[in-house]
Every structure is written in C-alpha cells, then in structure tokens.
Image (spheres, grey):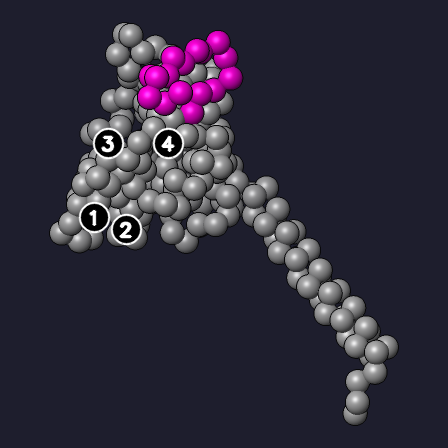
Amino acid sequence: MKATPSNERRQGRQRRERRERVATQISNQKKARLSSIEIFRLDGEGLGQHLDAIAEILHACVHDGANVGFVLPFDLNQARAFWAEKIAPGLVANSRIVLVAKVNNQVAGTVQLNLDTPPNQPHRADVSKLLVHPKYRKLGIGRALMEQIESYAENDGRRLLTLDTATDIAENLYLSLGYERAGHIPGYARDPNEDRFVGTTIMYKVLPGSLRLVRPSAYV
C-alpha cells in the first residue's frame, strides 16, 4: 500500500509520541532513583556498624579498575583493614569526614574529606576516595556525595578543595561540579590491574567565601 502524506504525518506523530513517552518514563525512573538516595556522616561507631558494607564497596571498585591506592590481588580483609586502621583514627580525632550513601537502604557509595591540613592551610581540605559500587553506577550517587561533602567543607570553614583523579569519567564529573584542572602528572601511580604506571589530574575548587587566590603570572 502506497504511503500518503497524511499517513506519513500520522506515523511521524506516533513515533514522536512514543519517543516522548519513553523519555518521560526514563526521567521519572531517574527521579525515583535519585529520591531514594540517603546520605549520612559516619562516626567511629557508625564505621564499625557499616564496616563490611564499605569494605565491599572498596573491594568491588578496586577489582573494577578504580585507581585509589591499591593493586591486585586485593581481598576483603585488606579492604576492612584500610577502613579500620587508616580511616577510623581520623574519625575519632574529627580530622576526617566520611559520608556514606544508601539506596533502598543498601550502602552504595562513600566519599571522604581530609581536614588534617598544615597550620598554614586551615582554609583547605582534600577530597578523596569517592567510591560508588559498580552495581549502583549512573544513579547520580557520586554527584550527590560530592555536593554533600562540599556542604560539610563549608560548614567547617574550608574554602578550597583539592583532589586528584586518574579517570576521565571522574574528571568529567568534577569539571561539571565546578572543579578546575591544576595540572597533570604522568606516571603517578601503578594501575591496579596491570603492570604499568598511569597519570593523575590534580584539580581544585574554590567554594563561596572570602578566599582570594593569587595566581602565578604564567596562568594569568
């Protein structure tokens, strides 16, 4: 049957309506997922309660290729030891903030803010270990954690945040949040899965406040 102009217009309209319905469904699903994210701060007791869950996140991320300070082989006992031995003392001393994200009451991600800076840098803090379990990726968890950690930094009087990242995906997230590239260091750390060294990008963000940065003339 030969298509007529009216049939083509009707078919085109139907295709547009189908695309709009699909787009609306995807948007609604995404909003539902985002609304289910719960973010809270861990203290020493909370770390003990959630130790297995956050150790599993670290373990899964390293095995998925995240370059966050560890190389394979890397087991769950090593992951637990990192949190219990390296992170817990900072929580007790209030020199480190750890946020955890839950989705549908399941621990899905975490991020840290190191407040233990030198006496001449009371305005600065280091963001580190933004980790989202691979099965909870692309739900906006990383962005939500980063936005919350900025609020904690501001409340503590910090106006300059610094971090480093080895992946383009994470770098793009940070750029979208207002971070700027300070530079790139080649061969900075060993790849977790391969016997080679990879570079890292140093980034920073100036939060609202009275901080005034004096840039070297080479960057003006």
Q: Evaluate if marks 4 and 2 touch, with contact meaning CB atoms under 8 Å apart.
A: no
What residue is pinned by disc 4? 181
Residue name at image x 52 percent, y 40 percent: 37
What residue is pinned by disc 1? 192
Residue lying at the far bottom in this picture: please name it. Answer: 1
For label 2, count other residues whose C-alpha is less than 10 Å away and answer few (under 14), some (14-19) or many (20+). Answer: some
Q: Earlier in the sequence, mark 2 or mark 3?
A: 2
Q: Evaluate if marks 1 and 2 touch, with contact meaning CB atoms under 8 Å apart.
A: yes
Q: CA distance from mark 4 to mark 2?
A: 22 Å
Q: Amino acid at mark 3?
A: Ala
Name the element at disc 2. Answer: loop
The residue stretch that appears in magenta: 205-220
Q: Give the image location of residue 118, x and y in percent.
A: 26, 12
Q: Quadrant of the C terminus?
A: top left
Left or right: residue 66 compared with residue 174: left
Closer to the eye: label 1 or 4: 4
Whether residue 42 is visible to the viewer of this picture, yes or no, is no
Q: CA distance from mark 1 to mark 2?
A: 6 Å
